[in-house]
């Protein structure tokens, strides 16, 4: 996040709420936050405004800021996802995101094979080829950039605007895995080839093949990260 006072206060408060350090239903006064962070009331007000927009807090007149339970949070917002992934105990968030991807991305690939423009299909093939070269070189940051672009383009090329708006969710989970050391040091050859297979099936207008190849990518992802959430209880929102 940017290095402004507002951003630092927002980030710390968000992490504190997500981690449970500041528990649901607890109340915090603006004066307490000013003292805690040594910042002005306007900085606190702006941070609280963002947290309100995320459904994480509610202002209570003459009382302060009341922390809301997870059932009220904007769980698809990239900030909330990022804060949850930054926790040491991030297995449940990874599981939820991976299961979401597994449900959506194969269908998006299938629809892309039916509806993608020639330009989008060509870009996917070029991205898949470059991902293979970069993945073999071990440049994980550049690979991450290409991987985000690839999966975002598949979602957009599906022609389903709801799928397309999940691009930032996918970007956050891919970024979180890479920056927390949860990706292989060198992407597996099968995974690299499967991205090529998805792109080839989309360009060739073969929806069943596109679905199957993307489904296999998701299966490999689950195999790689499932140990992180093994034994973690599931989350049932009220």
Image: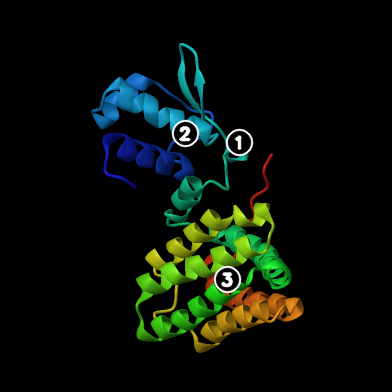
Residue underneath mark 2: 51
Quadrant of the image occupied by residue 163: bottom right
Q: Is 178 left or right of 58, judged from the image as shown?
A: left
Residue situated furthest top in the rendering: 62
Instruction: Pick the residue in front: 54 or 167.
Output: 167
| Quadrant where the image shows the C terminus | top right
Mark 3 secondary-structure assignment: helix
Query: Disc 1 or 3, which lies upstream in sequence?
Result: 1
Q: CA distance from mark 3 to mark 2?
A: 40 Å
Q: Is 202 left or right of 88, judged from the image as shown?
A: right
Q: Are marks 1 and 3 in contact (CB under 8 Å)?
A: no
Mark 1 secondary-structure assignment: helix
Residue underneath mark 1: 72
Measured as percent of width and height from the top left, residue 205 is found at 72, 78
Query: Disc 3 or 2, which lies upstream in sequence?
Result: 2
Q: CA distance from mark 1 to mark 2?
A: 11 Å
* Residue drawn at the location 31% of the way across and 27% of the way down: 43
Residue underneath mark 3: 119
Q: Is residue 26 above or below residue 143?
A: above
Q: Which mark is residue 213?
A: none
Quadrant of the image occupied by residue 11: top left
Residue 182 visible in image: no
- Crowdedness of circle 1 by 10 Å Cα count: few (<14), some, many (20+)? some
Residue situated furthest right in the rendering: 208
* Residue drawn at the location 41% of the way across and 41% of the way down: 16
Residue 99 visible in image: yes
- Crowdedness of circle 3 by 10 Å Cα count: few (<14), some, many (20+)? few
Q: Are marks 1 and 2 in contact (CB under 8 Å)?
A: no
Instruction: Pick the residue in front: 59 or 152.
Output: 152
Mark 2 secondary-structure assignment: helix
């Amino acid at each position: 996040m940017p290095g402004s006072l507002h951003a630092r206060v927002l980030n710390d408060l968000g992490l504190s709420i997500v981690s449970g350090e500041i528990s649901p239903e607890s109340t915090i006064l603006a004066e307490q936050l000013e003292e805690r962070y040594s910042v002005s009331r306007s900085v606190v007000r702006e941070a609280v405004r963002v947290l309100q927009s995320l459904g994480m807090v509610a202002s209570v007149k003459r009382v302060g800021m009341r922390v809301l339970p997870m059932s009220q949070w904007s769980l698809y917002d990239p900030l909330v996802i990022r804060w949850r992934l930054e926790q040491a105990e991030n297995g449940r968030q990874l599981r939820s995101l991976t299961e979401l991807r597994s449900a959506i991305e194969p269908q998006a690939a299938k629809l892309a094979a039916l509806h993608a423009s020639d330009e989008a299909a060509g870009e996917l093939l070029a991205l898949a080829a470059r991902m293979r070269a970069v993945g073999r070189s071990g440049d994980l940051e550049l690979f991450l950039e290409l991987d985000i672009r690839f999966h975002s383009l598949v979602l957009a090329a599906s022609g389903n605007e709801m799928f397309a708006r999940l691009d930032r969710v996918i970007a956050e989970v891919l970024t979180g895995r890479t920056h927390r050391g949860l990706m292989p040091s060198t992407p597996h050859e099968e995974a690299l080839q499967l991205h090529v297979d998805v792109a080839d099936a989309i360009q060739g207008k073969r929806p069943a093949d596109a679905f199957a190849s993307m489904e296999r990518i998701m299966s490999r992802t689950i195999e790689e990260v499932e140990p992180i959430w093994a034994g973690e209880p599931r989350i049932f929102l009220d």
